[in-house]
Each structure stands twice: as C-alpha cells, then as structure tokens.
Image (tube, rainbow, N blue to C red):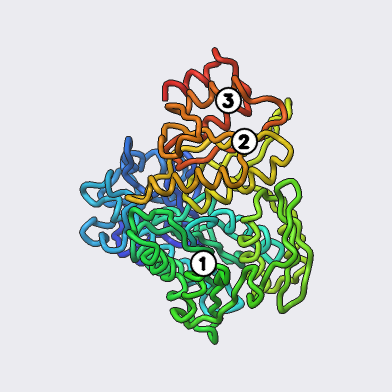
Amino acid sequence: MIEMRLADVAAATGGRLHRASGDERVTAVEFDSRAIGPGGLFLALPGERVDGHDFAAAAVAAGAAGVLAARAVDAPAVVVPPAEARSGAGTYLAEHDPDGAGAAVLAALARLARHNVDALTAGGPPGLAVVGVTGSSGKTSTKDLLAAVLAPLGPTVAPPGSFNNELGHPWTALRADASTRHLVLELSARGPGHIAALCRVAPPRIGVVLNVGRAHLGEFGSPEAIAQAKGELVEALPAGGDGGVAVLNADDPAVIGMAPRTAARLVSVGRSAGATVRAVDVGSEAGRARFRLVSPAGEADVALRLVGTHHVGNALAAAAVALELGATPDSVAASLGAAGPVSRWRMEVADRADGVTVVNDAYNANPESMRAALTALTDLGRGRRTWAVLGRMAELGAQEAAAHAEVAAAAGELGVGTLLAVGEPGYGSAARHVADPAAALALLRAEVTPGDVVLVKASRAVGLDRVAAALLDDLRPDDRQENELVSR
C-alpha cells in the first residue's frame, strides 16, 4: 500500500484517532497478529474463538503502527464506531459479530482499500491496471494464470488462494503500491449486490466473466439470478474509450449475453469460431491440454502444465487480458506453459512412489466442476484404473439430489472405473458408498493398487482433502494422523 500516516488512515476511513499522535507511519495491513511487522496496521476483527481487539496491544508491541478497531483499545488506533459503518460491510463476520464491530472494521478496510487504489490509478492508463475475475467455477485457477502471464510485464499483485470476499478483497487491494503495475482480484458472490460492492472497493478496468454454472444455486435460486449477479462485474467497468475491457466467454450463452450490460469494449474468448481470442486444434496429452492460440495480435502454440482440458477456457481468458496489456502471443504461450498449480486443492496432481496418482480437487464442487474433474481423471488415467472419490456438493438447494444423479451419470458416461461416494447416497446404485472420509481412506488403502489414479472431490466442508493428503503420505493404520482423521 502507499505509505500513510495514521491520521490519513483516520481521514480515509471516517474514523477517529485514539491514543495516537497521527504521525505513525502505516505501510501494510494485517488481520493476523502473528504476521504483523513494523509499519503494520492491525485489523481488530472478531472471530469464532477470539476477538482481535484483545490482541491490539500485542500487535503494537510486535511493531504495528496502530490498530483499526471498532472500540477503544490499549494501543494507538483508528476507531470506527459500528453505527457508522454497517452499510456495505457484507456478511463475512455476521455470525460472529452480534454488535457490528467486525462490520465496522470491514467497512473501514474497504474505504481504505478504495483510497489506496484511487491513488494508484489516478490519471488512468498506464497506471495500475485492476483486473477483476468472476464466474461460477475456475476463478482461482484463472486468477493464478493471470498472475503468471502478467508478471513478465511488470510487478503484479494477486490474492493467495481464494481471498475473494469482503475481507480478502480489500486486503489484497492494499498489497498494491507505487511499483505495482497489475492488481488481479477474484470476486465471489453469495447474493445479489455482492460483486457490485467489491467493485466499489477496487474499481476494475478489465473484467473477466468465465461462466455461469450452478455453484451456490441454493442461495441464488436460479441460473438467471446467478448470471445477473456475475454480470455486476461488467456493469462496473469504465467505457471502452476510458480503457474499459470486458472479457466474456463466447462459449457460454449466459456470459456472452452480458455484452449489452457494459459500456466497456468487448473481447470474447472461447473455442467458438467468432471469438476474438480463441483456441483451435485442442487436444490433450497425459491429461494436459494443448491448443493453438489465435488472436488479432497473432498465433502461438500452447501446452499447459495444468491437468484438465477445462483449463483451456481459463488460459484463454488470461491470454486475452495479457494481450490487452501489452504481451505478445509468444510470451503468453510461454507463461501459460510454465504455469503450474498455485492455489491448494485445485487439481493438484501428485504421484506416490508406488505409481499411484492422486488428484486432489477437494476445495469445492458443483455439477460443472465435477464433470470437468471427471473428464480430467479419465484423460489422465487412460490405460489405468480410475477412482472418483466424491462427496456432497453443497449449496445447491432443492437441485442437490438431481445434481448428484447427474454427476453419477457423467462418471458412467466417461468410463470412470470406480465411483466411491462418501457420506452421500445421492450418487446412485452404481456407486460404492462409505459413511465418512475415514471409511473412504480405509477402503482405498485396502484396494488401490500401483498405477491407479484417484480423484478426490467434494465441497470443502466434507473434508476429503484429508483423504488425499493421507493417501499421499501412505500412512499406516496406527499412525497419529490417521487417528486424527478418524476422530474429526
């Protein structure tokens, strides 16, 4: 972030100085007191087990310049009363925030992030380029690919993992400083208006919409409502004459249908013949996609390290943004080919010493990402035995049972060897069923043989990531980690 005095922080957030001169210098923001350092501004956020306000003095003792708080603390601080900051703070801390203290700090953090981004984008291009990415699936992988293709063009900031809500979004925006050329932000939504609110925190100049699927269908109610929410990103973009660019998936009718909702210049991506940036001659080798990148700037051959042909669309979106910001087709192809998995539990592929391959895609799941993962499993496992260890897809509402049946049918259609359903009877009679992750691990240990390929995927709450980790560790039945798995 740009260096600020604590008095400037108070002015930007609408707070008041508390036990501070105002001349304290702030150069970073942290919500974890263990990560605080000299010049840090500690965010006093309430949590499930602890309240950050109780760690204010310790944070300052560790070098923090001050604290952003919702009530008086025993340290130099900027205090924002809850009554002044509820609007737009979102739902991140709702269940742990009965008095609105967390909402106050989050709203103040959003205002501080906007102040930082405004300072860095003043005057327009070629200043800081803010790139926003949304979609029902693939956001995090595309964000990671964007960081890879933009890094050769200049210093790039992108969030770790899925830092895409009303805490992670402004926190990431505050990592950008005067040297940063590209700020890549992932935008999530669990209801109407969420993406629009995130766009107000860090207004994007380039917006990418990947797809409209059924993730969070239970919260939105319909695919049309999901499309309406995702399109809030393109509505927030500046006009094309002011540098605004909307990168839309031409292969998804709900996405390309967002074109009339934006004043930005349209760049379409996909395998469709009419796409501005497209992939032709798509194939795969050992589950990894190859294609020829075709764009107005030229063509280049791309060979991805990432597993799964569904990454072709993600790669095209990243390529389109990079080409807009000055990259060449050849440099984009080189960066895409060198990019490996960055964020955890998203098609992580690892081989055991005995030749068993474990694919850990257990971060989240919806019908579209399930089919993509199953397709990758069968591509990767050609000539080998394949296992799909699947758990519940949450947040689908009344459509959950039908979606599970759809995924089971897809597994059969694709020729998956064994479908192992964990704690979820909705995958049908063709699946083998176990009660929980511990039972799944026991069965796999007993039956998986060298050369097999095992995909592990479910909504995160199911905890199948622990099964993948245990398989790779090849734990013995009496090992401590397995006992912990069984007890959780």
Q: Which residue is mark 1?
A: 209
x 55%, y 56%: residue:
138
Q: Secondary structure at mark 2?
A: loop
x 65%, y 60%: residue:
312
Q: Answer with left or right where residue 332 lies relative to residue 80.
A: right
Residue 303 in the image: x percent, y percent? 76, 56
Q: Amino acid at mark 1?
A: Val
Q: Amino acid at mark 3?
A: Leu
Q: Residues within 10 Å of mark 3 (few under 14, many from 20)?
A: some
Q: Which mark is residue 147?
A: none
Q: Can you say whether 226 is above or below 339 in the image?
A: below
Labels 1 and 2: the sequence-earlier one: 1
Q: Residues within 10 Å of mark 2 (few under 14, many from 20)?
A: some
Residue 77 seen: no
Which label lies toward us, 3 or 1?
3
* 42, 257: nearer the viewer: 257
Which label lies toward us, 1 or 2?
2
Q: Amino acid at mark 2?
A: Gly
Quadrant location of the C terminus in the rendered image: top left
Labels 3 and 1: the sequence-earlier one: 1
Q: Secondary structure at mark 1?
A: strand
Q: Which residue is mark 3?
A: 444
Q: Which residue is mark 2?
A: 417
Q: Answer with left or right where residue 438 lies relative to residue 178.
A: left
Residue 358 in the image: x percent, y percent? 64, 35
